Each structure stands twice: as C-alpha cells, then as structure tokens.
Image: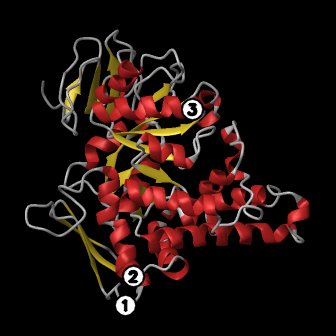
Amino acid sequence: MKIANNILFLLLLFYFLFRNCLLRKVVQSTLLFNFTLIDGNGGNPRPNCGLIINDKGKIYNTRPQNATHMDILLSFALYGGITSIRDMGGDVPFLLPYVSLGFLPKIPYPRIYYSCLIGGPDFMLDPRVQQAAHGTVPGTTGWLRSITNTTDIPAAIKSAVDIGVTGIKIYADLDKNLTVAITKEAKKQGLRIWAHSAIFPTKPSEEVAAGIEVLSHTAYFVFESYDPMPQNYKVRFNGDYVNHSYNSQNITNLLQMIKQADVILDATVYVFTEPDSIRANSYFSMFRSSASTASHNNDLDFPRIGQQWIFNVTRNAHELGIRICAGTDDLGSSELGDKFPNIHKEIELFVHECGFSPLEAITSATKTASQAIGIDKYYGTIEPGKVADLVILYDDPSINITNTRKVYSVIKQGVFYTIPNQTL
C-alpha cells in the first residue's frame, strides 16, 4: 500500500494501491488521487485526476471538467475562514481530487469529509442522485446506496467504508426499522451517522431513538406533529407551519428527547429563511402553498411564518442546551457575487434571531462543528496537541458577530493564508 501522489499513471499498464487520506484500508475498491492520466487514444494528458476502481476493474471517475470552478469555490471557502467541510451530497467521484488536495497544508482548500448517501429505491430516482451516480446504477455504489428489507446491510455499509467515507447521510424513503438497522451497522463499522431531520416516513423522534448523531434542518421538525407521517419525502418543503405551533407539546417533547440523547442539530436556518439564499428563493414559493388557504389571510405572509417557526424552534433548542452546529447547505460563491461564505450569515442569524451570544455562535461553527464531523480530537478548539486551524480577525467577534467577516489571515494546519486586498 502506498500513497499515490503526483505520479504518472499509465492506465493500461498498472494500478497503484494506497491508503487514502483518512487512512482507511481499501479492500474492495481502489482510490487513486493526484496522478496524470495519459490517454492512449492520443488525447491531452489530464493532470490531478482521481479514480475509484472496483474489484472488477470498472472505473467510476475522472477529474471533473469544471475543475476551475471548484478551485475558485474551495479557495473562496478557505479564505473565508472555512478549514473543514462536511459534505453530505453523496457525489464522491466528483470530490475525490479535491479531498486529497485539501488535506495538504499548502493547498488553499478546506479539508473535505465526505459521505455515503443512503435512501430507499424511490429516492434513487431523484435527478440529483442520477447525476451523482456517474453512469453506475444509482444505489449500488459505496457513495450512493439504496436500502430495502432484502439488502445485505453490513455489505452495503462496508462498501462505503472501503471508499473512505467519514459518515453516512440518511436522506429519505426509509422506515424506522431500516433506519435502526442502518444506524446500528454504520456505528459498528466506525462511521458517523448523519440524517435529514425527517426521513419520510420516519419521524424526527424515531430518528433520535434509532441513534442518529446529527440531524439536519430545523425546518423539518414540523413533521413531528403530523399524524400520520407523510410517506413521500417530496413533501418536505410543504410543512404546515401555521397549524403546527413551534411550541406544541410534540415539538417540546422532541427537543427534550434530542437533548437527552445528546444529538447535534445542524439547524441550517439561513438556507430556509433568507431571501438572498439560492435555495430559499425556491423554498419560499413552496412555503406559500403548503398550508390550507383557510389557515392564513395573505398567502405572501407564509414565508415569514415559516421563517419565524424555524427561528423559534432553533432558539428553544439552544435554550434547552442542545448542541447546535453551524452549517448552510449553500456555501455561497464569489462567482455569484458573494464576498464571504454563507457560514457567516448562518452564525449571524443565530445571534440576531435565535438567542445565541456571539461566542456561542462561534462555538457552533468551530467546536460543535468538529464534533458533528467527528474530528474534535484534533480540530475545533485551541488546545495543546491539536492541529493549528485558526482565523485571525481585525476586530473582536465576541463584541459584534459580523466581525467574523473581517479576516486578516486563515491558518490551516499551521500554514498562514493572508487575505489579499481585504476591505473593512
């Protein structure tokens, strides 16, 4: 086993076996990073490729064609203060070249911790899943897995372990019994357990009981009050925030259950509540038609009602002492005119709308975020023996949370990245 780093790879002659950056032993699949691919048909050499090759020799990936866009995006993230990313999109082949580079101190990318996306057969018909399959049958690979009552779950989870995922992301279309079985096996094999806060038809409380470690999206907690629970995950944007109060007994019981189980909430308030969020623009149109017309007078008010519901539940969760990590589901992009990653907007909303102090909001993006990934032994706080990942600011963010935008320098694994032409 050896690290394949900046080597010339002759695809028709040989493979190199190696340990990936997470130091997981590859058994059934081979992952190759940072080599130059020479096209035997006469095409131009393609540097910095990444491949997954299974035990039958089938190739699942080459370097994405829009690498320039990703270079810009990841540098934008790092210079905006992000040194680690928890990716839950399930497109491992696309990410592989950037994963390996992100773990190198002198490459201006965050480290990326990627996942296996898990759902039922209907979920595998989602166009996003189809795209992430890269020509494979959706639901049959280590990064996209369809689970049914007949699935060999240990083997399915092992296929994810073999390609170096940090955790599984349970998305949708799974009942509570399958959720329990998947969670139990993934923990047994050393993976983190991440999930949407409503899996459909599995309720949030049933996820907590199953052992989910991180729940994403406060917005979906509204489905805890539904009886019966919707079966189709496509209704996730249609929560009735008018007729299901944020402080109902169902929601209160759910939050207490989350606190007792010490589950982390990845609230993602920005992406559901801010009009400048790309996703919020589409969510709002769904919010407007999701409750019965008799329940509110002005259809245009419904986005505001949904926003306040999300803020209120997140505030109650925080006051109860639930660990909340900062995540966005919408990184932002300098190519779209953003000056900073949206994580800054997320923690600002925590302070301005959800009852956090500035230091509590910063903790959600550092210590608690590292706990959500499962890397808090080495990252997330300033302690002897931990890796030097730091952000140096011009002004004190404990006084004003917007000062997190005033970045002088980012330190990733001890290497300084000073921000050019910073405008205060």
Q: Which residue is mark 3?
A: 174
346 vs 291: above or below: below
Q: Residues within 10 Å of mark 2 (few under 14, many from 20)?
A: many
Q: Secondary structure at mark 3?
A: loop
Q: Are marks 1 and 2 in contact (CB under 8 Å)?
A: yes
Q: Nearer the viewer, residue 134 or 192?
A: 192
Q: Secondary structure at mark 2?
A: helix
Which sits earlier in the primary sequence, circle 3 or circle 2? 3
16 vs 311: above or below: above
Q: Secondary structure at mark 1?
A: loop
Q: Nearer the viewer, residue 355 or 73?
A: 355
Residue type pointed to by label 2: Pro
Q: Position of residue 2 (x, y in %)?
A: 12, 27
Is 207 left, or right, of 98 in this rendering? Answer: right
Q: Nearer the viewer, residue 147 or 32?
A: 147
Q: Position of residue 326 (x, y in %)?
A: 43, 64
Rendered image quadrant of residue 168: top left
Q: CA distance from mark 3 to mark 2?
A: 38 Å
Is 239 left, or right, of 259 in this rendering? Answer: right
Q: Are marks 1 and 3 in contact (CB under 8 Å)?
A: no
Residue in view at x 53 percent, y 57 percent: 254
Is 215 left, or right, of 312 in this rendering? Answer: left
Q: Nearer the viewer, residue 41 or 327?
A: 327
Residue type pointed to by label 1: Ile
Residue in view at x 79 percent, y 55 percent: 290
Which sits earlier in the primary sequence, circle 1 or circle 3? 3
- Find residue 358 and name its label: 2
Quadrant of the image containing the C terminus = bottom left
Residue in view at x 32 percent, y 24 percent: 158
**Residue 179 in sight here:** yes
Is 249 left, or right, of 260 in this rendering? Answer: right
